[in-house]
């Protein structure tokens, strides 16, 4: 357990390890290069001195618009050391959103990664309070500063400096540390204000039971603009582990193979994609498909041992491990000891599939507003299908409608310049309304069943939680995303966004032309295929929850196109608006239709 008071205490730990590597990054020729603790200190100090020279003072905002890179961490620590407030933005945001957040935050400095991000800034419109722009990549960017040029004094600043260290120690727990914009699944972006104390109090207790240490390593690939990724990186720095920055998701498989991390942290969609890749490869061969099914059946018999952290044994298991499970572990680099999932519900199907493959995933839960961890499964306190037990410094209670409310030192003080919205999410007495429906079992394990605002209420008064059903659909390798609809209607229906790589491979095997996606999803054989997927899930549901009609759309939903949040959660209202015509067709004869 740590005794952190501020995020500058995290920096002190990360920069107090001498010549030992604290970070790794990949240069242009593919070589992974280390950054030692003293080198990190010199770089942070050099940039902090530049910021102070520009007149940056306590409370000033610095925007970071970048993929995961070592420069991100240096900018973060330099901003915090000077008393500034960093405002991390997702690199997938549009120019319009970038402009809104820069103006709303009143940022004085913007640190960008590349030409692509610089062009967004240029297209963002008038930014009256922005005084300095820094670009990490080399090139001609008008009046922008070169990050590399700002680092020229870093080697000379690797020795501890009393003035700099004293300045960093002046930060207080109640000082604002960051503003993280979150649009969630509905509404305009809101700036979540988190203090040094909010984030530090969460770090003090969240990862202690895992026992991470200097032998551990992790690849930082989830966007650092998301609080979960940032929290994980801070925690691992405090635990003396080594971080490797992977700026693009498509570089992750090669990075895992090269670096062989011991810790893997991802959102559920990443685990779902890995599962779908395994099943997709097996589906191409009847023999491989039978071997996979056989191996998973052997693994399921050993699931209780896996979930207890006990290595399964027996000839059947060993053969299954050699033929299948070992190869799945190799996809993660072969050395991962701890698998963690957060950011969205993992789902029992996915959690169970990996458990059957001998991989125990520790699912957690939290929100940006809670800094972020509320609950997490641990090696000695783990229950599949739950998000674990609440942290020792977080209190939980449930409102009459089942909404989870939490209280503790990690709860944010409010939304940036939004007093009305802030008041709406607090129930009094410091209790924060999470917006999630859940329950606690007799042993204190927390389950989250759905978002309160996303519950589908049929015209007959039945409440349907869509997320667990959508997760069951996504467990099939042919389904990338699913969106249930039916609020205020007689029955529920579903929109399915295919995993087109898997669908097109299947179509080719059936002699179906796969070039035109709009035509492909309307092909009778394809419609029948997806109807069978829906029917299989319906068979496990009570009648009022079953999906009476379905439509396969010609789009694979994405962050870039706006159907998913940066943490891969479904933007239900966006999807409903985009496919209003298809939804209307579901209910065109509702007045006369009979619900099965």
Image (tube, rainbow, N blue to C red):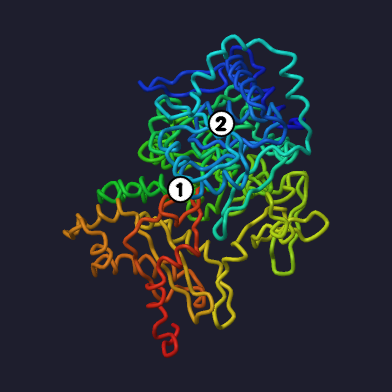
Badge 1 crowding class, 10 Å Cα cut-off, few under 14, some 14 to 19, many 20 or more, is some
Instruction: Provide residue 296's location: percent of width, then percent of height.
Output: 41, 49
Instruction: Provide residue 523's location: percent of width, then percent of height.
Output: 23, 67
User: Going from the N terminus, do you reach mark 1 or mark 2 first?
Assistant: 1
Residue under numbered circle 1: 94
Instruction: Provide residue 165's location: percent of width, then percent of height.
Output: 73, 19
On screen, residue 463 above or below 76: below
Residue 441 location, quadrant = bottom right
Query: Along the horizontal axis of the image, is 213 left or right of 5?
Result: left
Residue sitting farthest toward the right: 429
Secondary structure type for disc 1: loop
Viewport quadrant of the C terminus: bottom left
For the question of whether residue 72 can be seen, the reply is: yes
Instruction: Provide residue 107's location: percent of width, then percent of height.
Output: 61, 39
Badge 2 crowding class, 10 Å Cα cut-off, few under 14, some 14 to 19, many 20 or more, is some
Report the residue at 52% width, 62% height from top: 468
Residue sitting farthest toward the left: 511
Nearer to us in this view, 378 or 183: 183
Report the residue at 61% width, 35% height from top: 108
Residue sitting farthest toward the bottom: 592
For the question of whether residue 306 can be seen, the reply is: no
Viewport quadrant of the N terminus: top right
Secondary structure type for disc 2: strand
Q: Residue 132 carries which label?
A: 2
Q: Distance between the residues labelled 1 and 2?
A: 21 Å
């Amino acid at each position: 357990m740590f005794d952190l008071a501020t995020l500058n205490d995290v920096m002190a730990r990360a920069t107090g390890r001498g010549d030992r590597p604290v970070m790794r990054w990949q240069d242009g020729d593919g070589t992974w290069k280390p950054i030692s603790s003293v080198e990190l200190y010199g770089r942070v100090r050099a940039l902090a001195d530049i910021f102070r020279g520009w007149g940056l003072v306590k409370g000033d905002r610095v925007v970071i618009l970048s993929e995961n890179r070592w420069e991100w961490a240096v900018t973060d620590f330099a901003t915090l050391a000077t008393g500034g407030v960093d405002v991390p933005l997702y690199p997938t945001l549009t120019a319009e959103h970038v402009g809104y957040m820069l103006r709303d935050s009143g940022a004085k400095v913007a640190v960008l990664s590349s030409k692509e991000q610089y062009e967004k800034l240029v297209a963002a419109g008038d930014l009256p309070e922005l005084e300095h722009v820094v670009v990490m990549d080399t090139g001609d960017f008008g009046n922008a500063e070169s990050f590399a040029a700002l680092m020229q004094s870093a080697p000379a600043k690797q020795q501890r400096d009393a003035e700099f260290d004293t300045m960093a120690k002046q930060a207080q727990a109640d000082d604002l540390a960051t503003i993280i914009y979150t649009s969630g699944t509905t509404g305009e972006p809101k700036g979540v204000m988190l203090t040094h104390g909010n984030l530090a109090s969460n770090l003090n207790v969240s990862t202690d039971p895992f026992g991470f240490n200097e032998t551990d390593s992790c690849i930082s690939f989830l966007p650092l603009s998301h609080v979960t990724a940032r929290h994980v990186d801070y925690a691992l720095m405090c635990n003396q582990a080594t971080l490797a920055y992977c700026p693009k998701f498509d570089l992750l498989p090669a990075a895992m193979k090269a670096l062989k991390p011991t810790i893997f942290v991802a959102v559920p969609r990443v685990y779902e994609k890995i599962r779908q890749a395994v099943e997709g490869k097996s589906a191409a061969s009847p023999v491989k498909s039978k071997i996979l099914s056989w191996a998973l059946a052997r693994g399921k018999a050993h699931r209780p041992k896996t979930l207890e952290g006990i290595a399964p044994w027996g000839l059947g298991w060993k053969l299954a491990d050699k033929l299948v499970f070992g190869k799945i572990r190799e996809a993660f680099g072969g050395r991962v000891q701890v698998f963690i999932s957060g950011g969205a519900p993992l789902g029992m199907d996915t959690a169970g599939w990996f458990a059957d493959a001998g991989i125990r995933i520790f699912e957690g839960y939290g929100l940006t507003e809670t800094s972020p961890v509320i609950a997490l499964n641990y090696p000695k306190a783990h229950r599949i299908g739950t998000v674990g037990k609440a942290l020792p410094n977080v209190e939980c209670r449930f409102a009459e409608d089942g909404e989870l409310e939490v209280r503790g030192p990690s709860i944010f003080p409010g939304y940036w310049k939004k007093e009305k919205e802030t008041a709406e999410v607090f129930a009094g007495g410091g209790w924060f309304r999470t917006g999630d429906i859940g329950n606690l079992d007799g042993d204190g394990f927390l389950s989250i069943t759905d978002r309160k605002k996303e519950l589908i209420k049929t015209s007959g008064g039945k409440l349907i939680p869509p997320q667990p059903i959508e997760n069951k659909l996504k467990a099939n390798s042919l389904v990338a995303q699913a969106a249930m609809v039916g609020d205020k209607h007689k029955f529920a229906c579903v929109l399915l966004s295919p995993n087109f790589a898997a669908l097109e491979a299947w179509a080719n095997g059936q002699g179906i032309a796969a070039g035109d996606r709009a035509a492909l999803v309307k092909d009778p054989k394809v419609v029948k295929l997806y109807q069978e997927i829906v029917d299989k899930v319906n068979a496990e549901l009570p009648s009022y929850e079953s999906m009476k009609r379905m439509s396969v759309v010609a789009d694979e939903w994405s962050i870039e196109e706006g159907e998913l949040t940066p943490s891969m959660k479904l933007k239900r209202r966006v999807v409903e608006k985009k496919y209003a015509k298809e939804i209307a067709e579901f209910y065109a004869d509702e007045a006369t239709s009979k619900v099965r």
